[in-house]
Image: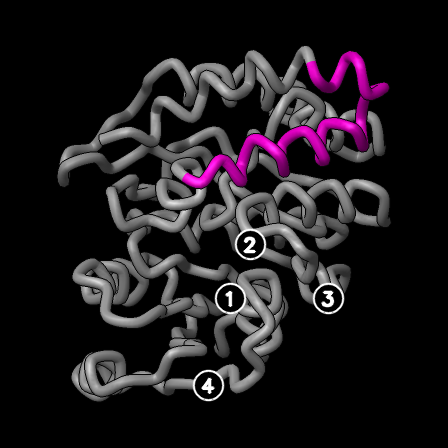
Amino acid sequence: MKPIHTFVVLAYKESEYLEECIKSVLNQKYKSNVVIATSTPNKFIKDLAKKYNLKVVENKKKEGIGRDFDFAIEQANTKLVTVAHQDDIYDYEYSSEVVKKYQKNKFLSIIFTDYYEIKNNEKVMTNKNLKIKRILLLPLRKGAKSRFIKRCALRLGNAICCPAVAFNKDLVKTPVFNCNFKCNVDWYAWEKLSNKKGEFAYIKEKLMGHRVHEESTTTEIIKDNIRTKEDLEMLKKFWPTPIAKIINHFYKGAEKNNKI
């Protein structure tokens, strides 16, 4: 039987963690398809692809992070696709649980799991930031059919971890991420999808690890104060401007968790 799920590994330049990510998506209980997508083709990526017998597809349009994600989604020929960030890892049960959830309800637009963080090569199962996100996600545990419930996890910040998300290509059509943001391309995408048909499904098990390190895009953006500006712009989609500014003041504190 052909798989209905694909991991598209989004590779950029020469990440020391790329091979670990590749190993994790190949070592799944449910054998998904695996493809590498990149806008920065190089020998390092090609050699790893050859080592693991993987196809590399090149995004020749240099249009930013959002377009990179949309391009990755477009490379999958299966119903479900997860855009795997090169620095992250996926637990053995990830794709299996995602596929199970989809088979029970094919009207899900996105399916996402809980996650842990990886700092200094150590698994951090919980911290203040993760606790807050899990509280925001509580209303979604029994499913999110209505627009109101889907937006509950987004009103006070972005509680959905982008690399933990699997997209149902029958309901999610690109462009999804393409915008002018540098950091909140994912929050932008979830807000956009919350206004469209399709349910959100949250799997409460921690089935993937999101790496936080000095070279990560999120860490770099925080240093440039770009994230704070984009957070405010997103919060305005849910709240009047005065309230959005107050929430953004407190939300900024979450950035401290990205400091190594």
Amino acid type, residue under disc 2 in the picture: Ala
Residue at mark 2: 166
Q: Give the answer, above or below, for where 213 lies relative to 131.
A: below
Side of 47 where 137 appears, left or right: right
Identify the residue at horizontal 35%, vertical 69% (top origin): 12
Residue nearer the viewer, 226 or 121: 226
Which numbered marker is on residue 58? Answer: 4
Residue 47 lies in quadrant: bottom left
Among all residues in the image, which is located at the extreme front?
224
Residue 77 lies in quadrant: bottom right
Looking at the rendering, in which quadrant would you find the C terminus?
Answer: top left
Give the structural element (helix, strand or loop) at label 1.
strand
Verify CB contact (< 8 Å) between mark 1 and mark 2.
yes
Residue at mark 3: 175
Amino acid type, residue under disc 1 in the picture: His
Q: Residues within 10 Å of mark 4 (few under 14, many from 20)?
A: some
Expressed as whole percent of the image width and height from the top left, the position of residue 213 reads 25, 42
Q: Residues within 10 Å of mark 2 (few under 14, many from 20)?
A: many
